[in-house]
Image (spheres, coloured by chain):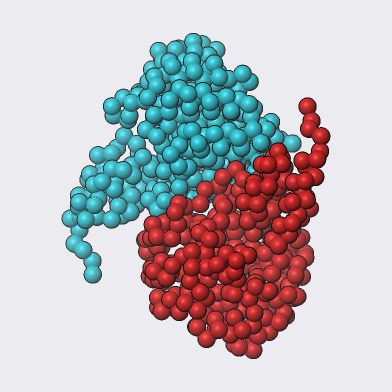
Chain colours: A red, B cyan
Amino acid sequence: MKKVVIHDPTLRDGQHAVRHQLGTAALRRYAQAADAAGIPVVEVGHGNGLGASSLQVGQAAVGDDEMLSTVREALRRSRMGVFMLPGWGTSADLRRAIAHGADVIRIGVHATETSLAERHLGVLRDAGAEAHCVLMMSHMASPEELAEHAARAVGYGAQAVGIMDSAGHFLPPDVTARITAIVTAVGTTPVIFHGHNNLGMAVANSVAAADAGALIIDGCARGFGAGAGNTQLEVLVPVLERSGFATGIDLYALLDAADLAERELMPTPPVTASMSIVSGLAGVFSGFKHRVVELSAPAGVDPRDVFFELGRRQAIAGQEDLIVDVVAELSARPAIG
Amino acid sequence: MKKVVIHDPTLRDGQHAVRHQLGTAALRRYAQAADAAGIPVVEVGHGNGLGASSLQVGQAAVGDDEMLSTVREALRRSRMGVFMLPGWGTSADLRRAIAHGADVIRIGVHATETSLAERHLGVLRDAGAEAHCVLMMSHMASPEELAEHAARAVGYGAQAVGIMDSAGHFLPPDVTARITAIVTAVGTTPVIFHGHNNLGMAVANSVAAADAGALIIDGCARGFGAGAGNTQLEVLVPVLERSGFATGIDLYALLDAADLAERELMPTPPVTASMSIVSGLAGVFSGFKHRVVELSAPAGVDPRDVFFELGRRQAIAGQEDLIVDVVAELSARPAIG
């Protein structure tokens, strides 16, 4: 049976669904439950990663140092993961995370901006940490571009490289094409897939990724994450097992961890609501939703039109100003009919 | 572009999630919204179909006659569908439904019990109604058995025939094998697929069915249904369109209908909770959940073990007595460790 390594960002990506307000008790208890299930990597942090807690993207309830020490102490068998976006976090943040015992450190960059990860991947290589590089919003790049950037990240020192379907836009054939291209380009370097469920395809996409040779697959308990959420971990694991992949995870303990997550981490599990479907179809970061809805209503514009127009303009996170432009243009158009 | 016909049992299968308590105002408003979106068939009724309202499976808030006349009046373009399980409903119920203007009448039978549908399919053929036959719990039969029973149903007069993944057990390759076998067996007769989301695969399975030649695909707004719910209709439609199938449905009006359904039909949208995952893996009807949990706790038995044992014994709806036996046997086993 082929193996896959499950990477669990419940305590990092899930933070987006609760404005980064997970407390230390919740972090500890979920980490212990995940550890008991034998989940290989438990990722923790602010939703936007190391150093990101701020007024702009939200201040976390717990600082990076306390999050890392809490989870480190809770884990016996699982390795601890962290995430960092260059610009939000710095080399100093990486070194602090290593000092806290982070085992796996992921640098996230836009799909075609691998060069932004070069310096930090170098820092991690010199420090001897396990460095991953993930290409976000990967539906905006072709399989060939992703393969080129993945190979570049390996050249910078990444020991695993892969893609995030940040907008939840992919269908399985899209994933197959991209993972196949990346696996071909990076040879024996483990390849990562991280899905979102905007089109109800997160589990199916993850199986397609594993079938195409991805070795590291991400999932969150109950899909905990913003909007439609991430790949639902406790569904993903038994489905991968049935599909011929060994995860080494105990099913009942995993279900227990997911039940705990539903009770203690989230107000309600993610729902695939209409605006999440639209953002997935449009290929737009679902974090735009609040602003899109807020700006569309007073302008008499359909927020769904705004999402599709943002998709046509290939808007990415950080370009929230585009929302204002699109709403203004759509509201200026003469009404039809 | 190939065509698929969307069949929407929100107002029938969704009833299971609210103990058949949908009122006439909710029925009318959803039917109008579905009609406005251009959904070809809107199915309505008690969750277990015509004639099923009873103390045993739950008394509906609204009787069959009133449900049918309410929805009939609300529909302009959409055709009205009804469902019947032989034994719960009778030929008289079928005739009443036809008198109420039901356009599409589905007879549901266990996967390998097509003979139970013979008489009712004959009644429908003689009445000139469009008769469908759906094979339930279809994961319990091989592709060859399903093909044989589907062909038999066509012989009895079914004008469309297909399978329900009643336990939410299938992965896409399972669906591909079964739909392919059925399409081969029944030739030009339209083939139906009806999914459930216990393993997060309802949309992916439905696309696999369409790819394998299924022409009629079921989906419910927000997946409205018991446990993990049905295939989420407003996700299914755009994903089918992106996958090369024309549905003729207006996306925005469909999303509006789903938003209305979330507000007016359900307390909360379905969640894929741990026990739903277990029932899907075990291949057991999720309607067993309440009894399994209720009987397991006082006996000190893990309800998940009960589900997997019921799966090994191929328990089907109506065999709730088996739960008592399994719980008793598991509780009598010496504890390990």
Residue displayed at 75% across by 61% down:
A141
Q: Is residue A239 above or below residue A214?
A: above
Residue displayed at 59% across by 59% down:
A195
In the rendered image, residue B49, in percent from the top left (x then y), is placed at 42, 25
Q: Quadrant of residue A303?
A: top right
In the rendered image, residue B272, in percent from the top left (x then y), is placed at 45, 49
Residue displayed at 31% across by 34% down:
B318
In the rendered image, residue A125, in percent from the top left (x then y), is placed at 64, 85
Query: Can residue B268 be seen in the rendering of this structure?
Result: yes
Q: How many numbered discs sit on the rendered protein?
A: 0
Query: Can residue A180 be seen in the rendering of this structure?
Result: no
Q: Quadrant of residue A71?
A: bottom left
The answer to which of B225 and A245 lies nearer the viewer is B225
- In the rendered structure, the answer to whether residue A317 lies left or right of residue A44 reads right
- In the rendered structure, the answer to whether residue B27 lies left or right of residue A205 reads left
Residue displayed at 34% across by 52% down:
B308
Q: Quadrant of the C terminus of chain A?
A: top right
Q: Is residue A287 above or below residue A131?
A: above
Q: Quadrant of residue B319?
A: top left
Q: Is residue A226 above or below residue B142?
A: below
In the rendered image, residue A69, in percent from the top left (x then y), is placed at 45, 79
The answer to which of B155 and B107 lies nearer the viewer is B107
